[in-house]
């Protein structure tokens, strides 16, 4: 039987989530995605109109099929958590069942089980502010959207994950080294995500035989990264300083995710796996 994957955080064809979906599809997995509610309309319209057809192309020439797109806002665990202004917001009012718990229930109803869970989402409203100037609300929002969202997805999806399954998130080296410009508590959020990767690997491994890993990815010109504002500089810095002097492609991260989700990685859990052309290993710039 082929594997089934749920990938949270796909809203266009530029980010890591899309590339991971493609690599998993190329390896034979069935693809379900969770798309941020306000981005759902444009994503589904673009898919339907063939705007992504070129980038849906898999190595064998076929096009990746996304079996179902679920609206998702990973900041809310259940309907009771959704504040009135969000519920009635016109970008949300057209969709239903988009809290984490409800999405997991919908996937269970539609498909029964999954084998692979991918978290490829982050948000930090004050990311462009240094930590010294970050508000409590901004910091907590970064942690909620970028770290607890993973805990919540794992909590809610583990009951429908087949034993032997695998979960993967995306992190960034700003968790452990100083990266000026990655502010607003986003560096803290990635540190929490990496720590949770270890603790959840223990808990989910012992209790459910599920593996938990995170990929520390190098810089990619995604929509989210462009919003931070320093992505071109980070790409130039990597080209200049990394052991491998080439631009990192999203596919390289996608392929690492497919490996981690596969039986080839059956003894790997609780790990931060660097997919960054080796930049993390450098001690000084050159
Ligand atoms: P992206 O814009 O493709 O993906 C981020 C996604 O998160 C978007 O689709 C957005 O709609 C979604 N999202 C935001 N808030 C959400 C919420 N509350 N609920 C559901 N979805 C929500 O950008 P990306 O850079 O590919 O980001 C994917 C992951 O990769 C993130 O965790 C990011 O931190 C990580 N990462 C990115 C880089 C980089 O340079 N681009 C480097 C290292 C790690």
Image: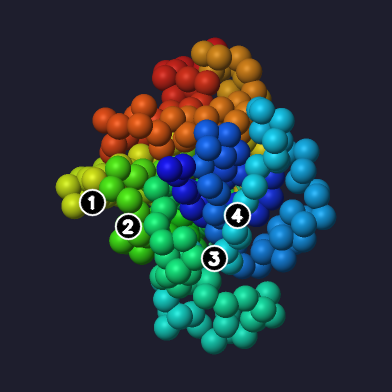
Residue matched to label 2:
158
Residue matched to label 1:
208
The Cα–Cα distance between marks 1 and 2, rounded to whole angstroms, is 8 Å
Query: Do residues under tags 1 and 2 come within 8 Å of each other at their CB atoms?
Result: yes
The Cα–Cα distance between marks 3 and 2, rounded to whole angstroms, is 17 Å
Residue at image x 48%, y 48%?
A: 5
Identify whether 83 is placed above or below 99.
Answer: below
Which circle's residue, 1 or 3, is located before the other in the chain? Answer: 3
* Label 1, ligand 1: CB separation under 8 Å: no
User: Dot 4: few (<14), some (14–19), or many (≥20) neighbours within 10 Å?
Assistant: few
User: Dot 2: few (<14), some (14–19), or many (≥20) neighbours within 10 Å?
Assistant: many
Which circle's residue, 4 or 3, is located before the other in the chain? Answer: 4
Residue matched to label 3:
72
Q: Answer whether residue 55 is visible to the viewer in this image.
A: yes
Residue at image x 62%, y 29%?
A: 249
The secondary element bearing badge 2 is classed as helix
User: Dot 3: few (<14), some (14–19), or many (≥20) neighbours within 10 Å?
Assistant: many
* Label 2, ligand 1: CB separation under 8 Å: no
The Cα–Cα distance between marks 1 and 4, rounded to whole angstroms, is 26 Å
Q: Which mark is residue 5?
A: none
The label nearer to you, 2 versus 4, is 4
Residue matched to label 4:
67
Q: Position of residue 272 (x, y in %)?
A: 36, 34
Identify whether 79 is placed above or below 70.
Answer: below
Extreme front residue here?
1
């Amino acid at each position: 039987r082929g594997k089934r994957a749920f990938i949270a955080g796909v809203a266009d064809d530029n980010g890591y989530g899309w590339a991971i979906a493609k690599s998993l599809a190329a390896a034979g997995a069935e693809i379900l995605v969770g798309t941020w509610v306000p981005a759902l309309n444009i994503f589904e319209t673009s898919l339907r109109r063939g705007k992504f057809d070129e980038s849906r192309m898999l190595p064998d020439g076929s096009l990746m099929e996304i079996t179902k797109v679920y609206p998702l806002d990973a900041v809310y665990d259940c309907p009771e958590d959704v504040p009135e202004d969000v519920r009635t917001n016109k970008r949300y009012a057209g969709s239903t069942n988009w809290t984490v718990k409800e999405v997991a229930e919908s996937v269970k109803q539609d498909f029964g089980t999954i084998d692979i869970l991918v978290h490829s989402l982050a948000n930090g409203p004050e990311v462009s502010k240094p930590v010294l100037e970050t508000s409590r609300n901004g910091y907590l929002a970064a942690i909620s959207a970028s770290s607890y969202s993973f805990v919540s997805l794992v909590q809610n999806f583990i009951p429908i994950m087949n034993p032997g399954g695998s979960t993967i998130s995306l992190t960034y080296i700003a968790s452990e080294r100083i990266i000026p410009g990655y502010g607003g508590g986003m560096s803290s959020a990635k540190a929490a995500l990496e720590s949770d990767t270890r603790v959840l690997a223990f808990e989910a491994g012992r209790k459910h035989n599920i593996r938990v890993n995170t990929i520390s990815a190098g810089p990619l010109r995604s929509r989210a990264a462009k919003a931070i504002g320093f992505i071109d500089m980070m790409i130039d810095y990597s080209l200049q300083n990394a052991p491998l002097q080439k631009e990192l492609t999203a596919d390289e991260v996608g392929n690492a995710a497919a490996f981690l989700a596969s039986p080839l990685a059956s003894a790997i859990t609780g790990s931060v796996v660097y997919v960054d052309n080796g930049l993390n290993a450098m001690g000084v710039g050159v």
